[in-house]
Image (cartoon, rainbow, N blue to C red):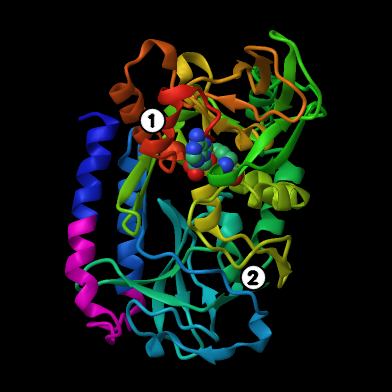
Amino acid sequence: MGIWEEAQEEYNRLLALHKKLEVMKGRVPPQQPTLKENVLTELSSIRCRNAQRPPGSYTCHTVVTNHYPPCLESWTTLQKTSISQLRIGIHHVGQVLIVRLITKPANYGGCLSVIEDEHSNVAIIEVHNDHREPYEVLPEGATCAIKQPFLYAVSRKKVRVRVDHPSDLVLIAREPTRALARLSETYYASCGIEEVAQNTSKTRQEWLNHASNHETVVIKDSGAAGRGLFATKSVNKGDVVLCETAFAMVLPPSQLARVMCRHDLVRKRFRVNPDVLLYVRVMEELQRRPTAVPDLLQLWCGDYRSEVKEVLIMDGNLVLDAFHISRIVELNAMACGPNRLGEGIWLKASYTNHSCAPNVSYKLHGNFLVAYALEDIGEGQELFVSYVDHPETKPFEERHRALADEENAREVTHSDVQRIDDGGNQGL
Ligand SMILES: C[S@@+](CC[C@H](N)C(=O)[O-])C[C@H]1O[C@@H](n2cnc3c(N)ncnc32)[C@H](O)[C@@H]1O
């Protein structure tokens, strides 16, 4: 079975299960996991399943059951609750769960471990959208605060505490296990130096290090199409209008390492590599470079309304609305790389609107995007690119179908295409 079919099958299964479990919302979990052994057995079976996967070709399925905002308050101001007080399918807004991570974490779509509260209640925790190594996300022995905890039913009998926004999990105190391991690595030089050296020497030419240049363009209101890119000075046919390095990009080789599926049961769609990997890269890049957060958050996100609009650090964590970022990636990603099997995000170029009679065309050199003028463009004129390949050779119906297939052009309506067909792009 191919990746796509596997994802489709899993999506259908998850959607049916989600519908069946909806009746459990608000209820007390059917069987409180009071015995540590019960919970630990489930986690170890996940570890076993992980170990059985052929190396380099495993599939991670992440399921999104609802969209909700990250907590914007400090955990110290929230009301303490316990695992036994949680109800299924509810975000316990204004509350916090203080727990200890009592086992080594496992990775299965999300990052999993076992938590124990001060009353010795135990549960499995599932953290999504944090793509660091599991031991960094859920270090064994650490005490953590889980803001607005959400108890999620994975079956009629099993529930898990789920975290979707990484900033909703705050590590309060860590046990020095990793520090000790590092000391031992230093002492015995056991950290696999050869492997480290091998990995770092594989320099990839795709990652070009050039400065972006967008002096010739400005973002302005474009009427019904929202914002668009406009020329700040006249350019001649063939001139470079904009060049820009990708904010984030994934290329085909990284798809081989793991297959990631994201099943969004709210938007009723699933996504498979490379879209999901690009989303992961964007989250990582934002964590690494918080100053880039405002630029990314301003990109087109359709009808998603987020309460996080700027760089916000809470309890030492960068607050990112994971659902917002995933929507931005969906709507602004561009195909790139060999056979267009990769995906990337270019912050400025993302503002270019679609036209079937484009005046600009993009060329990609690795992660470096260059936009060329296809005709003479006057100062103040809007720049348009075609979201469809070779629009001039395709009949109207086919172009419209291709546009509808492209998530980022979903809101380019039938009438927009019609207007362009009727007389150039002046109507936009
Ligand atoms: C990548 S964004 C382009 C920038 C966007 N206009 C903005 O305000 O940020 C793609 C979205 O722009 C809008 N768009 C692009 N081309 C359009 C067109 N020709 N007619 C109407 N809307 C268009 C659609 O909403 C589409 O989903």
Find out whether residue 340 is within the magenta segment: no
Tell me, yes or no, whether the two marked residues, 1 and 2, touch with CB atoms within 8 Å: no
Q: Which residues are magenta?
A: 15-37
- The numbered dot on residue 231 is none
Horizontal and vertical percent for residue 126?
43, 64
Q: Which residue is mark 1?
A: 418
Q: Nearer the viewer, residue 202 or 279?
A: 279
**Between tags 1 and 2, which lies in front?**
1
Residue at the image point whose x is 64% and y is 74% from the top: 72
Residue at the image point whose x is 71% and y is 57% from the top: 179
Q: Is residue 64 left or right of residue 299?
A: left
Q: Secondary structure at mark 2?
A: strand
Q: Which residue is mark 2?
A: 171
Q: Nearer the viewer, residue 361 or 158?
A: 361
Figure quadrant of the C terminus: top right
Find out whether residue 29 is within the magenta segment: yes
Identify residue type, mark 2.
Leu
Horizontal and vertical percent for residue 135?
57, 55
Measure how far apart labels 1 and 2 are at the Cα level: 54 Å
Residue at the image point whose x is 24% and y is 38% from the top: 6
Q: Is residue 128 left or right of residue 212?
A: left
Q: Secondary structure at mark 1?
A: helix
Figure quadrant of the N terminus: top left
